[in-house]
Image: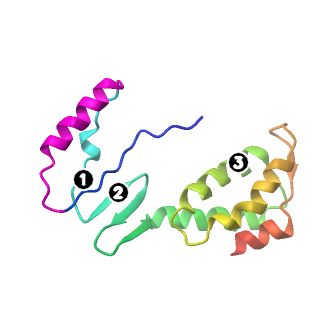
Amino acid sequence: MHYLDDFLFVFKSQIDLSSITCRYNEILAIIDLTAAPEKDMNDIIVTHLRFEFDSLKMEIRLFHNKHSRALHIVTDLLKAKSIIYSMLDEVLGFLSHYYQVILLGRPFLRNIFSALRRIPSSRSFHTRLSRAAKKDLRW
């Protein structure tokens, strides 16, 4: 099960946020959540869900370390003779999240998702990635 408890609000510059913040906190109280003031940001570049949003350049970027980790994961997958279900599941979760900001990244996960579906329910079962899946990873 996945749930999202982080919210991103974008407003015009120079807007008074005090009444909006007050209403937001009231709504959070109704649904039994609390605000995390340490996550509040009011800047041109803000961090949200491990992405960097730049309103001046109108870009969303990965943190450098996350980009490096994604490249490392893909390289390891390409070198692996076989892979177990839990590893493939974890890699797909990671790449699916980060491919939200990599242009045309998500379609290149299709063959890897297919490999995950082919693995029996046994979490320790090993499988090989198809040529198509490896081609997608090289992309």
Q: Quadrant of the N terminus?
A: top right
Give residue 13's position: percent from left, percent from top. 17, 62
Q: Which residue appears at 61% of the width and 56% of the height?
A: 96
Give residue 67's position: percent from left, percent from top. 52, 66
User: Which residue was labeled with disc 2?
Assistant: 47
User: Which residue was labeled with disc 1?
Assistant: 41
Which of the two discs, 3 and 2, labels the residue nearer the N terminus? 2
User: Which residue was labeled with disc 3?
Assistant: 89
Amino acid type at image mark 1: Met
Which of the two discs, 1 and 3, labels the residue nearer the N terminus? 1
User: Which secondary structure is most common in the magenta stretch?
Assistant: helix
Which of the two discs, 1 and 2, labels the residue nearer the N terminus? 1
Give residue 26's position: percent from left, percent from top. 24, 30
* Structure colour scheme: rainbow
> Do tag 1 and tag 2 residues touch (Cβ < 8 Å)?
yes
Amino acid type at image mark 3: Asp
Amino acid type at image mark 2: Thr
Q: Nearer the viewer, mark 1 or mark 3?
A: 1
> How many angstroms separate mark 1 from mark 3 (CA)?
33 Å
Magenta extent: 13-32
Q: Secondary structure at mark 3?
A: helix
Tell me if 15 is positioned left or right of 63 in this view: left
Q: Which residue appears at 76% of the width and 59% of the height?
A: 112
Q: Secondary structure at mark 2?
A: strand
